[in-house]
């Protein structure tokens, strides 16, 4: 049985905890006390959120997997993932923790991720929202890499429903709009 340690983050639907005795893993679970809209979305549109994210990870093209945090296990109640670490032994932090990121290698890698997601028509809108779904993994002082940690693939099933997102052209447009905002806010 996995034992929750300190809370290390949270999003709109889930919270993330370190796992006692497993420094390279973390566990996500639904937040207690979700609001009315969130409960509606989880109950009717996102019943199997964790399993969907695992399926998404397993179906990623090989060339994209290196940029995504690996999922170890998933059930209705939890999702166990890796916990990326930097070269100096500290845990990788989200982009928003840096304010502006001025590492050109990091941004070239982000551009590669965007290119590959577009190439494979994978439209993750959440990824580029507020800088919390991408970690900056520092492989050395100068080499930094993006690690995507949340990719539930909401799309049209977001609440309120966005039926226009059933069209690939609209998905692509929204994806790039989110990316441009992300880049403007965080590129140093």
Image: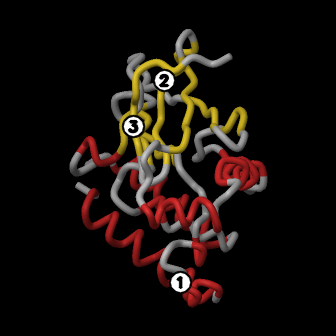
What residue did someone put label 2 on? 18
Mark 2 crowdedness (10 Å alpha carbons): few <14, some 14-19, many ≥20: many
Mark 1 crowdedness (10 Å alpha carbons): few <14, some 14-19, many ≥20: few
Q: Earlier in the sequence, mark 2 or mark 1?
A: 2
Do tag 3 and tag 1 residues touch (Cβ < 8 Å)?
A: no
Do tag 3 and tag 2 residues touch (Cβ < 8 Å)?
A: no
Query: Is 99 on the left or on the right of 144, as rendered?
Result: left
What is the distance, in whole Å, between disc 2 and disc 1 at their CAs? 34 Å
| Residue 41 lies in quadrant | bottom right
State the SS at label 1: loop
Q: Position of residue 112 (x, y in %)?
A: 53, 59
What residue did someone put label 3 on? 9
What residue did someone put label 1 on? 162
Most foreground residue, 132 or 75: 75
Q: Position of residue 151 (x, y in %)?
A: 57, 55
What is the distance, in whole Å, between disc 3 and disc 1 at their CAs? 27 Å
Residue in view at x 48 percent, y 78 percent:
160
Most foreground residue, 87 or 17: 17
Residue in view at x 41 percent, y 47 percent:
105
State the SS at label 3: strand
Q: Earlier in the sequence, mark 3 or mark 1?
A: 3
State the SS at label 2: strand
Q: Position of residue 67 (x, y in %)?
A: 58, 47
Above/below status of 116 relative to 103: below
Most foreground residue, 52 or 98: 52
């Amino acid at each position: 049985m996995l034992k929750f340690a300190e809370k290390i983050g949270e999003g709109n639907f889930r919270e993330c905890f370190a796992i006692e005795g497993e420094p390279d893993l973390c566990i996500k679970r639904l937040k207690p006390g979700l609001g009315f809209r969130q409960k509606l979305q989880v109950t009717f549109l996102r019943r199997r959120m964790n399993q969907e994210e695992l399926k998404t990870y397993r179906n990623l093209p090989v060339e994209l997997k290196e940029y995504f945090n690996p999922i170890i296990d998933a059930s209705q109640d939890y999702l166990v993932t890796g916990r990326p670490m930097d070269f100096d032994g500290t845990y990788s932090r989200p982009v928003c923790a840096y304010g502006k990121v001025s590492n050109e290698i990091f941004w070239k890698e982000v551009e590669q991720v965007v290119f590959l997601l577009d190439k494979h028509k994978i439209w993750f809108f959440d990824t580029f929202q507020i800088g919390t779904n991408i970690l900056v993994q520092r492989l050395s002082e100068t080499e930094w890499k993006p690690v995507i940690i949340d990719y539930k693939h909401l799309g049209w099933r977001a609440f309120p429903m966005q039926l226009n997102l059933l069209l690939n052209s609209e998905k692509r447009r929204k994806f790039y709009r989110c990316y441009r905002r992300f880049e403007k806010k965080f590129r140093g």
